Amino acid sequence: MKLRLHVWRQSGPGAEGRFVEYRPEHVTGDMSFLEMLDMLNESLLVRGERPIAFDSDCREGICGACGLMINGVAHGPTRATATCQLYMRSFKDGDEVWIEPWRARAFPVIEDLVVDRTALDRIIAAGGYISVDTGSAPEANSTLVPKRDADGAMDAAACIACGACVAACPNASASLFTAAKISHLGLLPQGQPERERRVLRMVAEMDASGFGHCTLHGECQVACPKEISIDTIARMNSDWLQTLLKRSGPRSRG
Ligand code: SF4
Ligand code: FES
């Protein structure tokens, strides 16, 4: 298949970027999108040119390292699919494909298609964990979890921290990511002791890191490769508001 690629090239964080056109050869439908870029990079190296920088690790849709804006869509045209799981059979001969990095103030470009996503790590560090005492693990069945809560926690835990929700959001909000982490822990009995502190700290860090606010466009859940539901944002907002009301006391509530 013959394609015209327009790839965002930017040599460093402060450098000016621009689209460069490439026409990769020998592309087949069985290739993954990243394998197609690998092959293009090999041809660039043979020509003595700088290869295109892009992120990937597991290439199995589980680590969240990959993530490209493909024709203006986070992770490309296939629903519920991370970029590394996207195959070239989703494109046809003669297609023009525009490839860009995530665009968000909180995700500065490092090089070409690679962005700095440590802002997501800071949100996790602010409270996305359960503090435990050391010692042996408790007996698994000593804390019973209702099936509905276990299912909800598992669905939220599927988030791979790829950042597609931020890239797809017109406000570059990290609400879906943050809400997934808050829901994952907040639905489980083990997450209750730190539930209030967690939501206040993680939401505050999300704001401090320069992400925008959620205005319920819903683009995030459409772009999410793990189909995290926007319902998690409602849960996060409810937890946050209830915690604030509780801490502000009865006089302020009146
Ligand atoms: S919520 Fe979905 S899109 Fe956002 S970081 Fe998690 S997996 Fe990626
Ligand atoms: S490379 Fe790990 S999710 Fe894509």
Image (spheres, grey):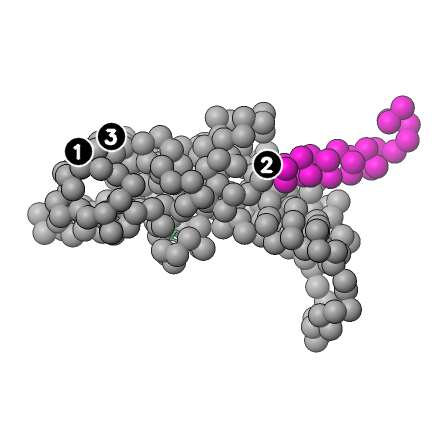
Separation (CA) of disc 1 from disc 2: 36 Å
Q: Is residue 166 left or right of residue 54?
A: right
> Mark 1 Cα within 10 Å, few/some/many (few <14, many 20+)?
few
* 8 lies left or right of 43: right
Mark 3 or 1, which is nearer the eye? 1
Crowdedness near tag 3: few (<14), some (14–19) or many (≥20) residues, C-alpha within 10 Å: some
The image's mark for residue 230 is 2
Q: Quadrant of the N terminus?
A: top left
Residue type for callout 2: Ile
Q: Residues within 10 Å of mark 2 (few under 14, many from 20)?
A: many
Is 90 contained in the magenta span?
no
Q: How many marks?
A: 3
- Taking the spot 44% from the left edge, 50% from the top edge, the residue there is 64
Label 2 secondary element: loop
Taken as a whole, is the magenta stretch helix, strand or loop? helix
Residue type, numbered disc 1: Gly
Stretch of the chain drawn in magenta: 231-254
Residue at image position (39%, 56%) is 60
Residue denoted by label 1: 94
Quick check: marks 3 and 1 in contact, CB under 8 Å? no
Q: Is 251 above or below relative to 13? A: above
Q: Nearer the viewer, mark 1 or mark 2?
A: 1
Determine if residue 241 is in view. yes
**Local SS, label 3:** strand
- Would residue 242 be counted in the magenta stretch? yes
**Residue sitting nearer the eye, 110 or 136:** 136
Q: Position of residue 139 (x, y in %)?
A: 73, 73
Q: Which of labels 2 and 3 is toward the front?
A: 2
The image position of residue 89, as x and y in percent, is: 26, 44
Query: What residue sits right under mark 3 in the picture?
Result: 18
